[in-house]
Amino acid sequence: MKTAETQNHPGRWWRELEDGRVVCELCPRECRLAEGQRGFCFVRQNIGNRMVLTTYGRSSGFCIDPIEKKPLDHFLPGTSVLSFGTAGCNLGCRFCQNWDISKSREMDRLMDAASPEGIARAASRLGCRSVAFTYNDPVIFAEYAMDIAQACRAEGVNSVAVTAGYITDLARPDFYRHMDAANVDLKAFTEAFYHRLCFGQLQPVLETLKYLKHETDVWFEITTLLIPGENDGDHELHAAAEWIAGSLGPDVPWHFTAFHPDFKLRDRPKTPPSTLTRARQIGLSKGLHYVYTGNVHDSAGGSTYCPGCGALVIERDWYELGAWNLEDGCCADCGRQISGVFEKSPGNWGRRREPVVLSQFSGS
């Protein structure tokens, strides 16, 4: 199903220059494109002096995941999420852990074709509480993601953006008003890191985080991939933790995950679990209530504790839930409210990961 309709969709957030080029106003790069030229993300293109999205309606594949894999620990724990991505990215991270998708310029990688209504219908029929835009950044396919989110709301399905938060002030409100939850990748806390290893800027990401906290009802969590010798120093982690506590408050969950050598950054070792534990302790020392270690086996670092009395309220072992000591979203021991989006009982999806072929669903 490789039709012009699914491949070249009218884009938003752009303006035309006097010389005939168009300026993309979706992300801070503001690529200036001549006729036929593609932006840094590769998927937004000037065709006929108009911006088009070339990957609308196409995906690199669908899979049912646990919501904790996004990672979101405080948003409908234990439930399943239908995950998918497209191709391309608006950052150039040399350490990208999904580089085969996000750096792909081969449109034939986009296997599954699906309408927004088809995706929403499939998620509902599969019992998924949410659809996640992930693997590559949904900002670059915002028109498609927003249409899917609208279709999902009609089906009672949530929409989750797994994103680097690299978006302009102009586009940010349009995009996030369609989202129910987000995980924002705070890659480091220095402009130098973003410039050298991501070919981007830190400040727009911080603006996205502040916008989510103070201007929306979107539930969001933060993830930082710790790279030995690059963004794992005590000084930087203290500074980031202080900024989160001061600008966002203590209740935004922060996940630390381990790097493995990949893509163009293969000269760094894997992140030892002790680094994640140290980072978690720094976050907690600054008054943050929910700091987690991820993608390592650390049940203590992956579980949720009451910031009031210290009781274990949600036990996690990898993506499996254990003890559940929440009552109406509050600690069962002391009654303190635990920040997040919770139901009376958790889901039971567990750690399963199941690929899905969307063409199995009629009309998709």
Image: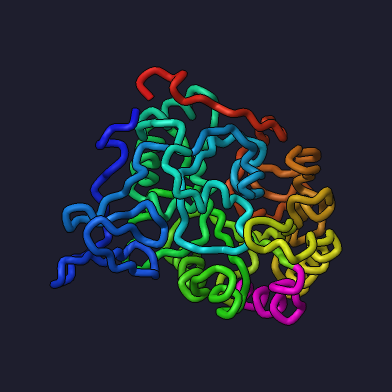
- From the viewer's side, name the closer residue of 298 and 12: 12
Q: Nearer the viewer, residue 108 or 204?
A: 108
Position of residue 306 relative to residue 27, above or below, is: above
The residue depicted at 31 percent of the width and 66 percent of the height is: 170
Q: Number of marks in the image?
A: 0
Residue at the far left: name it: 18
- Depth check: give the residue in front, 139 or 177: 139
State the image coordinates of residue 215 (x, y, percent, origin top left): 42, 64
Tell me, yes or no, whether the highlighted magenta stretch contains residue 244: yes
Vertical placement of residue 228 versus 310, above or below = below
Q: Is residue 345 left or right of residue 90?
A: right
Where does residue 349 sit, x and y in percent of width and height?
67, 31
Residue found 27% across the figure and 43% down from its top: 8
In the image, residue 266 lies at what x, y percent? Answer: 71, 61
Question: Which is the main secondary structure of the residues drawn in magenta?
Answer: helix
On the image, the x and y values in percent for residue 193 come to 60, 75
Residue 213 visible somewhere in the drawing: yes
Q: Which residues are magenta?
A: 228-245
Residue 176 shows up from this direction: no
Q: Quadrant of the C terminus?
A: top left
Task: Say whether residue 2 is magenta.
Answer: no
Residue 248, image quadrant:
bottom right
Q: Quadrant of the N terminus?
A: top left
Residue at the image point whose x is 29% and y is 59% from the top:
37
Q: Residue at x 27, y 60 (%)?
A: 13
Q: Is residue 228 left or right of residue 139?
A: right
Q: How is the image coloured?
A: rainbow
Residue 290 falls in which quadrant of the image?
Answer: bottom right
